């Protein structure tokens, strides 16, 4: 190849390289223009952010909205606290410090405070100029409504080197817990110089102390009833006024019903096969709400098995033994009480309906053998009659409880 051809080939190669460089430079310029138009300061910045699923710098800066936060600053703080989204942070605010201190006595394992997460604001307490503990505050930075001041020592965060005055901290009950009455194992924490800084982060998250009322009111705790207040407790009592068991269910479960009369004293006996169940408000002396000399309010579950007696416009419940020719019955429990009483009355009811003994002990003492008094007959439409008596019982006991609640609307010391 002569010299002239070599020069031509070299020139062509140079032109190709220059052309490719020009195209690349042009593309890079266009890509940089695109990056800047989308709000990024470099191509690399654009590639890094868009690879995360954001279309431009604005959508990336507003990514906090995607996770439900009020601001980017708030999101960053809650990320430090271990929360990826607003929903999880709000969930941990279900138990407020006020509820914790007033209702649960400052013990996270007590009553409705058990198995709850917590996310609280605190003020660093200084003693002799040195940080020593955290005072729990409301989200607005006050202690308004607290029955007492609650100081805790954060087990995971020694405060000796802390200079900030406020703290937001969290923990998860079950994994992290109070190690002692005033020692709290905090999972994560963020410190602030001023209350305003802390309030700007946590203040927008509303705290709602709420108790989920169980379908079975008999499972609601005394501490939960205390928290609900007069109006709500009366609403719950009123829910127990109407029978939850229809007449036909009583018809199906009552296999024997007998009415017995001894002079002017009438008693009706109902025998159940299988079990039905309903909730009743009672005022038994058993440490429930408003416990005092007049009894305490409870929601109890009444199971309909065994035998029931209706006498003097009230129901009692008992047990029975099915003998060859009779039912031997012991009655010891008024329906409106959840306390077990000593056996009060014994009855032998002959299956052929010839009579009953009103008091077994007295009959034996007087004559040495059982005596039957009066006459007994089968009850027609037993389910309808018992339903009427049960409905009356629910109304009487509920009204009695409501009177008690209204009387103690200013709650006595329990």
Image (cartoon, grey):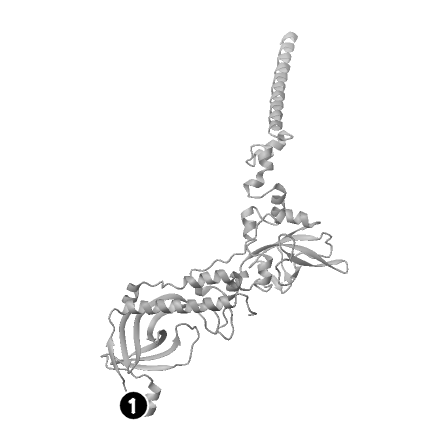
Residue 155 percent across, percent down from the top left: 65, 59
> Going 67% across and 58% down the picture, which residue do you hit?
135
Q: Up-down: is 73 above or below 286?
A: above
- Which residue was labeled with disc 1? 369
Total marks in image: 1
Q: Nearer the viewer, residue 262 or 11?
A: 262
Q: Tag 1, which secondary structure?
A: loop
Q: In screen coordinates, is 71 left or right of 365?
A: right
Q: In screen coordinates, is 280 left or right of 40?
A: left
Residue 320 percent across, percent down from the top left: 32, 77
Residue 360 percent across, percent down from the top left: 33, 85
> Going 63% across and 57% down the picture, which residue do you hit?
144
Tell me which corner region of the image, top left, top right, bottom left or bottom right, holds residue 383.
bottom left
Q: Up-down: is 233 above or below 371?
A: above
Residue 79 percent across, percent down from the top left: 60, 46
Tell me which corner region of the image, top left, top right, bottom left or bottom right, holds residue 353.
bottom left
Residue that lies at the very extreme toward the right in this rendered image: 128
Residue that lies at the very extreme toward the left in this rendered image: 352
Q: Is residue 216 visible?
A: no
Q: Up-down: is 276 above or below 20?
A: below
Q: Label 1 neighbourhood size at 10 Å, few (<14), some (14-19), many (20+)?
A: few
> Going 30% across and 71% down the picture, which residue do you hit?
272
Quarter of the C terminus within the rendering: bottom right
Q: Is residue 101 visible?
A: yes
Quarter of the N terminus within the rendering: top right
Tell me which corner region of the image, top left, top right, bottom left or bottom right, holds residue 342.
bottom left
Q: Nearer the viewer, residue 10 or 79?
A: 79
């Amino acid at each position: 190849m002569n010299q002239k051809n070599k020069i031509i080939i070299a020139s062509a190669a140079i032109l190709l390289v220059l052309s490719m460089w020009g195209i690349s430079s042009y593309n890079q310029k266009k890509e940089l223009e695109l990056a800047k138009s989308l709000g990024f300061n470099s191509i690399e910045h654009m590639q890094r952010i868009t690879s995360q699923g954001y279309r431009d710098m604005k959508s990336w800066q507003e990514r906090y909205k995607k996770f439900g936060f009020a601001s980017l600053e708030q999101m960053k703080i809650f990320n430090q606290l271990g929360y990826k989204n607003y929903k999880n942070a709000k969930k941990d605010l279900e138990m407020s410090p006020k509820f914790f201190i007033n209702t649960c006595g400052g013990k996270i394992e007590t009553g409705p405070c058990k198995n709850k997460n917590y996310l609280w604001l605190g003020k660093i307490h200084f003693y002799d100029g040195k940080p020593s503990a955290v005072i729990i505050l409301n989200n607005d930075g006050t202690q308004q409504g607290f029955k007492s001041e609650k100081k805790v020592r954060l087990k995971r965060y020694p405060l000796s080197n802390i200079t900030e005055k406020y703290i937001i901290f969290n923990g998860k009950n079950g994994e992290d817990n109070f190690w002692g009455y005033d020692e709290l194992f905090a999972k994560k924490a963020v410190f602030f110089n001023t209350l305003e800084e802390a309030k700007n982060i946590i203040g927008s998250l509303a705290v709602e102390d709420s108790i989920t009322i169980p379908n079975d009111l008999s499972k609601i705790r005394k501490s939960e009833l205390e928290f609900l207040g007069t109006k709500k407790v009366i609403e719950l009592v009123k829910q127990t006024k109407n029978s939850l068991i229809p007449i036909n269910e009583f018809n199906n479960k009552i296999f024997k019903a007998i009415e017995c009369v001894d002079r002017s004293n009438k008693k009706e006996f109902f025998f159940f096969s299988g079990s039905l169940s309903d909730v009743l408000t009672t005022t038994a002396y058993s440490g429930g709400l408003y416990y005092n000399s007049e009894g305490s309010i409870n929601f109890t579950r009444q199971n309909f098995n065994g035998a029931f007696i209706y006498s003097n416009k009230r129901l009692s419940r008992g047990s029975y033994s099915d003998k060859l020719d009779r039912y031997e019955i012991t009655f010891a429990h008024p329906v409106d009480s959840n306390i077990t009483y000593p056996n009060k009355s014994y009855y032998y009811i002959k299956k052929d309906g010839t009579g009953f003994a009103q008091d077994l002990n007295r009959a034996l003492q007087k004559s040495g053998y059982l005596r039957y008094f009066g006459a007994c007959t089968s009850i027609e439409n037993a389910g309808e009659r018992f339903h009427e008596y049960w409905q009356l019982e629910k109304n009487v006991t509920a009204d009695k409880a409501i009177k008690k609640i209204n009387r103690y609307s200013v709650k006595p010391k329990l």
